[in-house]
Amino acid sequence: METIVLYPSPGMGHLISMVELGKSILRRQPSLSITVLTMPPPYGGGATADYISHISTTVPSIAFHHLPAVSVDLGAFHSTEAILFEVIDRHNPHVLHALETVSASAAVSAFITDFFCTAALPIAAEFGVPTYYFLTSGAHFTALLLHLRELDRTATQSFKDMKRTPVDIPGVPPVPASEMVISLLDRTLSDYRDFVKVSDNMPKSDGIIINTFESLEPAPLAAMREGKCNRGGRTPPIFCVGPLLAAQDRDGGEHECLKWLDKQPSKSVVYISFGSLGLVSAAQLKEMAEGLERSGHRFLWVVRSPPWEDKAKRFLPPPEPDLVALLPPGFLERTEERGMVVKRWAPQVAVLGHAAVGGFVSHCGWNSILEAVCAGVPMVAWPLYAEQHFNRVVVAEGGLGLAVGVEEGEGGLVAAEEVERRVREVMEGVSVRKVVEEKSVEAAAAMAEGGSSVTALGKLLDLWKS
Ligand code: UDP
C-alpha cells in the first residue's frame, strides 16, 4: 500500500483545500491512500472536528492522523500567523513520529505541506520522502513567496514604512508596499522572519503545487518558471491543479438562504461575505447596511459580530450577532422584501453557483476568489487580513472585480457612499462580468479530461509511481 501524507495548516480554509487535493489525487489513482496530519486549531477559527469526521466517514481512503495538542499562551502573540508558525514549529517531533508510524504500514510516496508548515520540510526530507508545497493561495502569492528572500536581502526598511511605493515582484503587477501581505509589513516581527524561512525552504522542495489554473495567472507562472522569482537559485517544478473547491455536499442542501434565492430573479442578488474569519467594526457594519440599502439592489449578507474589544479574547470566535442592535434602526424591516441577512455562515459555493446571484462583495480570500471565478460572478474586492490586500490587486488588475476601500487606510471606514457605488457598478456593469464569465469557462476546461490541471496532476502521479 502506498500513501501520500498531507500536512495542512489547521485553519478551515487551508484544511478544506488540502482535503480537496487529496480527493482529487484519489479520483485519478484510487489505489493510493491519503494520510492527513491534523492539529487542533490553536485559536478560534471554526472548529474542524465535524468536518474531519464527515470526511472520515464519506471518504474512507482519507485517514486523519491527529497530532497531540500543543499549548501556547495566546496572549503572548501579536497575530494568528505568529501563533500558527510557533505551534507548527513545536509539532516537528510529532510529525517525525507520525511519519514513522505511517510508514510502518504503508510506503510514503510523497509529503505535501502547507506553506505555513514549512518547519516540517527538513524533517520529511531527512526521512527520505519527496517533499512538495501545496499553495492554498494563487500563483501571484507563490511568486511573492519565492521572491521574498531577494526582497529581504535588498530591503532597507519595512514595507509599512514604504507607504504606497510599488514593490517589484516578477510577473506580478506593481503592488503598493502598504498592500503587501499583513505579516510582511513589519520586518522586525516574528511572522515576517517565518515567511522568509518559507522563501528559503521552497526552492529546496521537489515541487510546488498551486490551487490555480494556468490561464488564470499566466504572468507569475511564466516568471517563476523562467527563474525570475529566485534569481541565482533553484525553482522547483510548478503544478497548477485547481481550481479545487470545497465540496457542496456538507452544508449546502436545504439552507434557508438557498430557498430564498430560488425566489429571486436571475443575477439580481449581491452576496456579501468575508470568509471564515472576517470581522468588521460595528461602525463599518452600519455603513455597509446603509450602502446596501441605498444601492437599491437585492442582497444576501452574512453578518458576524464585530471583533472582541477585550484583547484577551481577540483570537476567539465572536458571539452570535444581535442583528437588531448591530444594524441601523428599521433596516431589517425596510429591506425585508429584497434582502436577507444570515448570521455567521452561508453555504457559499452553493450560493455563488445559484442563478440569482449576480455579484459578490468578498474579502478576497483565495478560495472565495476561485469560487467566484468558477461561478462566473464578478467581485467587489474588500480585503481584511492575511494576503487579501495583495489579492485585491490581482482581482482588480485581472479585471475580475472592482476594488473597494483603497484609500481607507489602516482601520479606516469604507463609507456607505462607496459601498453603494461599488455595488451598483458590479451589479450593473458588463465588462467585469464578461471577463469573469470567460475565466469560468476556462476553469471548467482546466478541470476537464485533458485540461491543464488534470494533466498537471497526472504528471505528479507519474512522479510518485514507485
Ligand atoms: N465560506 C462559506 N460560508 C461563509 C464564509 C466562508 O462557505 O459564510 C467558505 C468559502 O466558501 C471558502 C472558505 O469558507 O471556501 C473561506 O476561504 P477563503 O480562502 O475565501 O478565506 P479564509 O476564510 O481562508 O480567509
Image: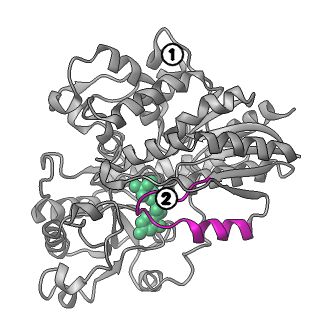
Which residue is disc 2 drawn over? Answer: 41
Examine the structure image and report whether residue 41 is included in the region drawn in magenta.
yes
Image quarter hosting the C terminus: top right
Colour approach in the figure: one colour
Q: 446 or 118, which lies in front? A: 118
Residue 227: which numbered mark, if any? 1
- Residue 389, image quadrant: top left
Query: Percent x, y for residue 216?
Result: 48, 40
- In percent of the image, x 51 and y 16: which residue is there? 227
Q: Distance of mark 1 from mark 2, alpha carbons?
A: 36 Å
Examine the structure image and report whether residue 318 is included in the region drawn in magenta.
no
Judge left or right: residue 360 versus residue 372: left
Question: Secondary structure under badge 2?
Answer: loop
- In percent of the image, x 53 and y 25: which residue is there? 201
Q: In this view, does 199 lie above or below 334?
A: above
Judge left or right: residue 252 versus residue 53: left
Q: Is tag 1's residue or tag 2's residue first in the polypeptide sequence?
A: 2
Query: Percent x, y for residue 144?
Result: 40, 29
Label 1 close to label 2 by CB (< 8 Å): no
Crowd class of label 2 (few under 14; some 14 to 19; many from 20; radius 10 Å): some
Residues drawn in magenta: 38-58
Q: 298 or 256, which lies in front? A: 256
Judge left or right: residue 33 versus residue 356: right
User: Which image quadrant shows ligand 1?
Assistant: bottom left
Query: Percent x, y for residue 159?
Result: 23, 29
Residue 376 in sight here: no
Q: 134 or 88, which lies in front? A: 88
Query: Percent x, y for residue 279?
Result: 28, 63
- In percent of the image, x 29 and y 36: which residue is there? 180
What is the three-letter code of the residue carrying label 2?
A: Pro
